[in-house]
Amino acid sequence: MTRAGEVLGTEAVTVTASAAWALTGVTRRGGPVPARSTYRLVVDPERAEPTRLSASVELLGERRTLTASVADGWVHVHVGGLGPAVDRKVPYAPGTSFDLLSPLVRSWWLALLSDRLTPGQDIPLRTVRFEAPAFAPQVELQSVRLHRVQDGLRLVEVSGPDGRRREALWLDVDGFVVRARAWLGGPKAPYFEWREVQAGDGPPRPGA
């Protein structure tokens, strides 16, 4: 992961599939205040719908945790650890996405529902967003668009309702994110970038 050419840390992602499909990520950031975050998303592959999400953020020895499960038309959310506890129910509808911590979390939706992506067409995406470190749920209507296909990769843009928060995602043939950029502070702010690194390659060089 980089920002303005500076290496911030690494994110390791694991995908497993059995009766359910699970996406697990661990992010480590260095610097004066090292941080570690984790997430695990479990998806029902037959319905292409999430069933459970868990996440955590650790900073200066303190930890904030999130659990969210989908049942009976609701997302049941519990947030604990440092800061105020949150217990809330959010209405759930089929096709709803989860957004938190990293653009790579979107791999589940883009991989399972990629047939809906049509060049130049905006797809509205109802999203429950858990912004770290508070993790309090926010429901918003995001927009997804397939811009182009090049060198075997599809470039997809995801934007927030006000258009300021934006992500560019490069997908492989299976629909998984292999590269991403995120403008979290608006289009004029430096973007964060995620690039795939093969085993043995080492971290990316600044400016690479």
Image (cartoon, rainbow, N blue to C red):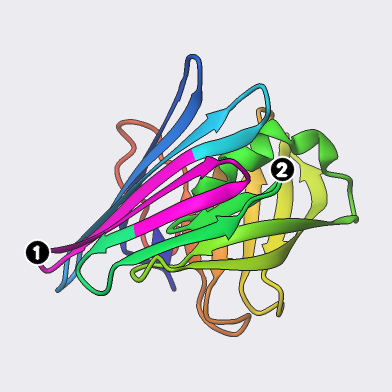
Magenta span: predominant SS is strand
Look at label 2 and name its amino acid.
Pro
Q: Residue furthest left?
A: 61
- Residue receiving disc 2: 94
Image x and y of residue 104, in percent: 51, 48
Image x and y of residue 127, in percent: 64, 58
Q: Is residue 169 above or below residue 31?
A: above
Q: Residue at x 65, y 34 (%)?
A: 111
Cα–Cα gap, marks 1 and 2: 38 Å
Horizontal side of residue 87 vs 129, given as left or right: left
Query: Considering the numbered disc 1 on the image, is that residue within a helix, a strand or a loop?
Result: loop
Query: Considering the numbered disc 2 on the image, is that residue within a helix, a strand or a loop?
Result: loop
Look at label 1 and name its amino acid.
Gly
The mark that comes first in sequence, 1 or 2, is 1
Q: Nearer the viewer, residue 170 or 76?
A: 76
Horizontal side of residue 193 vs 58, given as left or right: right
**Residue 149: quarter of image:** top right
Indicate whether residue 62 is drawn in magenta.
Answer: yes
Badge 2 density bin: few <14, some 14–19, many ≥20, Cα 10 Å: few
Residue range of the region highlighted in magenta in the rendering = 52-78
Image x and y of residue 120, in percent: 90, 56
The dot on residue 61 is 1
